[in-house]
Amino acid sequence: MSPDSLNPSPEWQKDLLPNRPFRLPTFAPVGIAIQCISYEIIAEVLKRKADATLPEARQIMTDARRWIDRAHVIGLDKIAPAKEIANFEAWLKTLAELNDRDREPPPLVDRQARQQWFNEWPLASKLRCAMPQIFAQALTDSIAFLAGSPASAALVPAEAYDSMERRFSPLARPKLRTHQMLGHAPATQEAMGVDSDLICLLQLVSEEALGMTFGDAGEVAFWISGDDLTRGRFDNAKIRLQGH
């Protein structure tokens, strides 16, 4: 299978600038999904320090924390009542809807006007445009959590799996890169020579779905000499971090 055979990015993952509405994607109607989405919304608000102290920002974070508490009452791997999901979706839609200040930004060449436009851009607009990233991360984390058992994994709708396929597949990269033990380990910068006297104990590559990154989408490898490996002197192993 090639990267081109993976499901294309769904409509909800596309850029929302300047004024495209956000359509809520399908997600597992379980506590963990409610928690992850709410956490990501809080994180997005807090990233915008200039806006985080605004009354509307405090209200959004208060509402999100209430949903996080509710998720724990429901159970992170339990199906939420239909009414709870309906109320949660209604809250999300209020955050994702267009407002009268969503408009086309000035051209890039007009830096002063563009900076003024950005400074005047309301939190509601910023949050709406961040929704694709918020949901992509929340769905990824939800799937990773529920993958612990077949029964839990079955709670995730097929549409959610399809939309996140690229995040979990190593084939989404330009070339296949996987974790490995022993053997010749490829690298993003300088691969260890095949004539080296060092042995690759373990190499881990950046894995977006697990929130595990080394450098700039690189890898971390643990190397040891043949003599130290024979004697079990793992304290002499060396670590090598590389990235683009």
Image: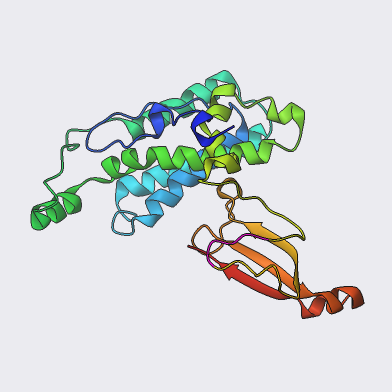
Identity of the residue drawn at 49% across and 22% down: 86
Residue 66 picture location, percent across and down: 51, 40
Residue at the outermost top position? 82
Identity of the residue drawn at 70% across and 36% down: 147
Residue 2 picture location, percent across and down: 55, 34
Residue 216 position (above or below residue 105): below
Residue 164 picture location, percent across and down: 54, 34
Please say which color scheme the image uses: rainbow
Determine whether, in the image, residue 193 is placed left or right of residue 37: right
Identity of the residue drawn at 44% across and 31% down: 9
Residue 235 picture location, percent across and down: 80, 79
Q: Which is the main secondary structure of the residues drawn in magenta?
A: loop
**In front of the other: 184 or 32:** 184
Q: Which residues are magenta?
A: 185-189
Specify the quadrant that holds the N terminus. Answer: top right
Determine whether, in the image, residue 119 is placed left or right of residue 198: left
Q: Quadrant of residue 70?
A: top right
Residue at the outermost right position? 231
Identity of the residue drawn at 49% across and 32% down: 4
Q: Quadrant of residue 196?
A: bottom right
Q: Quadrant of residue 31?
A: top right
Q: Is residue 178 magenta?
A: no
Determine whether, in the image, residue 97 is placed left or right of residue 208: left
The reply to whether residue 66 is in sight is: no
